[in-house]
Amino acid sequence: MVLKRRKFLIGGIIVILAIGYLGFTGFQNSATYYYTVGEFYEQGNSIYGENIRVNGLVAEGSVEQDSVGKMLKFIVVEEDKSLPVVYQGIVPDTFKTGINVVVEGTVDSEGVFQAHTLLPKCPSRYEAQESG
């Protein structure tokens, strides 16, 4: 009887530890901090190959879109810093020049950000309307 209870207790502890570990690593991967373009360049070579997020404005006149391959090229800027971005996938309807975007992906050896996620922000939808 004691042996059965001990096996059950050890098995329960292992299951709880496994669930805790999976929950922690899942949370850690989903809680990716995003850098501004300036902070991105401050990191130097330490972020190459890492999955990161970068926030900035889509530069006017920088958007090039290939309709056949669904490839989008643009430049994200913050003050005097700029970062070239390549994104392949479905482009959200709210994406346009001059808006704030968060791109998630990796930086290649040429310094081009290879984005796998494109999150345009549309502040006009969230601002309160003025009554007049």
Image: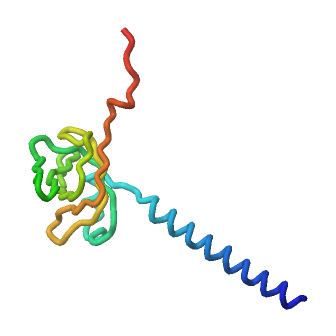
Q: Residue furthest top?
A: 132
Q: Is residue 10 left or right of residue 81?
A: right
Q: Nearer the viewer, residue 38 or 74?
A: 74
Residue 112: name its quadrant. bottom left
Q: Nearer the viewer, residue 103 or 41?
A: 103
**Is the image coloured rainbow, by chain, by secondary structure, or in one colour?**
rainbow
Task: Report the quarter where the N terminus lies.
Answer: bottom right
The image shows residue 58, relative to residue 9, as above or below, that is above
Q: Nearer the viewer, residue 69 or 78?
A: 69
Q: Residue furthest right?
A: 1
Task: Report the quarter where the C terminus lies.
Answer: top left
Residue 17 position in % (x across, y down): 65, 76
Residue 106: name its quadrant. bottom left
Residue 85 position in % (x across, y down): 19, 56
- Number of numbered callouts drawn: 0
Residue at image position (72%, 78%) is: 13
The image shows residue 103, relative to residue 99, as above or below, that is below
Q: Is residue 14 left or right of residue 58?
A: right
Residue at image position (33%, 34%) is: 123
Residue 43 position in % (x across, y down): 30, 64
Residue at image position (20%, 40%) is: 96
The image shows residue 8, relative to residue 111, as above or below, that is below
Residue 21 position in % (x across, y down): 58, 73
Q: Is residue 36 left or right of residue 82?
A: right
Q: Nearer the viewer, residue 59 or 92?
A: 92
Residue at image position (20%, 47%) is: 77
Q: Residue furthest bottom?
A: 3
